[in-house]
Image (cartoon, rainbow, N blue to C red):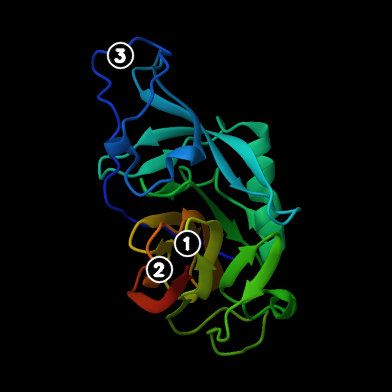
């Protein structure tokens, strides 16, 4: 994929940790699960680490990327951020979780960078996420990149539109700043675990950080960052595993892309049917 970015989300409140013993298993209350499907949380515990940090160890059900209608369980090691989101702790993720995100990014045409730049951030209503990066939108390989859309039953379903930067010599540095985000437009059914992703194409004449943030249904969020140098082009791609809930309707999707000079948003929707 490309260069990628980040997001924010409403609060899923877990059990306070101040009095918790190290490694103690806990069962989150219904209030703590927020918009998550309670059945999707297979295991959950909070642990006070030797370095003083409190980490969350949980296992969640996600859609298989290989078999339609099948779910698999992956583990996560999370750390709460000051704004109420969760960071996937780099270097601490279970092997099967890293392999899942690598396979997801491969389906999207890129490589997994969820463990880079401080770790992928997901919202409290998000079961799982991935941050990917791949070829520049101006490179010859960019024609193989998928459009924004969703993965259902292991099959990529692309949105109808995609926005990218102006074509140019792939070997020449960009001479003007641009950010062209592409939010997903897709559909699913109620009470469904589904994966959806969006992207932001960019070019920057300034050094700094490029960020991408995907928000789905106002609750599922993934945020990734990547360092940029002057003249660099790239694509930020974020994926979230989300629970559709029990209420049919049309729900917003947003991709926010930023470079050192400015930010831009693009908007789409998820249609949830009974």
Say which label, 2 or 3, has the lower sequence index.
Answer: 3
Residue 53: quadrant of the picture: top left
Q: Is residue 265 visible?
A: yes
Q: Distance between the residues labelled 1 and 2?
A: 6 Å
**Disc 2 designates what residue?**
248
Secondary structure beneath label 1: loop
Precedes in sequence: disc 1 or disc 2: 1
Q: Looking at the picture, tell me which residue is in the foreground, 224 or 36.
A: 36
| CB within 8 Å, label 1 to label 3 | no
Q: Quadrant of the N terminus?
A: bottom right
**Residue named by callout 3:** 20
Q: Nearer the viewer, mark 1 or mark 3?
A: 1
- Give the residue at mark 1: 190
- Residue drawn at x 59%, y 66% is 2
Q: Give the residue at x 72% y 57%.
A: 68
Q: Is residue 91 left or right of residue 85?
A: right
- How busy is the neighbourhood of tag 3: few (under 14 within 10 Å), some, or many (20 plus)? some
Where residue 238 sits: x, y (%)? 51, 61
Q: Residue 97, image x and y in percent?
A: 62, 39
Q: Which mark is residue 244?
A: none
Question: For the residue labelled by badge 3, is the local secondary structure a helix, a strand or a loop?
Answer: loop
């Amino acid at each position: 994929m490309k260069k990628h970015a980040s997001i924010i989300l409403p609060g899923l409140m877990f059990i306070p940790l101040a009095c918790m013993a190290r490694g103690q298993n806990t069962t989150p209350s219904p209030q703590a699960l927020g918009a998550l499907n309670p059945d999707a949380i297979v295991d959950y515990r909070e642990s006070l680490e030797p370095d003083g940090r409190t980490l969350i160890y949980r296992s969640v059900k996600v859609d298989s990327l290989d078999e339609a209608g099948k779910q698999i369980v992956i583990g996560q090691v999370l750390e709460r951020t000051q704004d109420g989101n969760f960071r996937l702790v780099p270097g601490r993720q279970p092997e099967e979780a890293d392999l899942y995100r690598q396979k997801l990014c491969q389906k999207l045409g890129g490589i997994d960078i969820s463990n880079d730049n401080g770790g992928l951030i997901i919202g409290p209503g998000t079961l799982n996420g991935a941050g990917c990066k791949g070829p520049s939108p101006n490179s010859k390989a960019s024609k193989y990149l998928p459009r924004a859309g969703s993965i259902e039953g292991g099959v990529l379903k692309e949105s109808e539109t995609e926005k990218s930067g102006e074509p140019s010599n792939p070997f020449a540095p960009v001479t003007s700043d641009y950010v062209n985000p592409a939010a997903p437009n897709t559909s699913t059914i109620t009470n469904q675990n589904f994966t959806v992703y969006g992207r932001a194409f960019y070019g920057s004449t300034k050094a700094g950080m490029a960020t991408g943030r995907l928000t789905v249904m106002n609750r599922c969020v993934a945020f990734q960052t990547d360092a940029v140098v002057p003249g660099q082009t790239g694509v930020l791609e974020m994926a979230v595993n989300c629970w559709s809930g029990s209420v049919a309707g049309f729900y917003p999707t947003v991709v926010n892309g930023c470079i050192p000079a400015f930010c831009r948003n693009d908007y789409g929707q998820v249609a949830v049917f009974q």
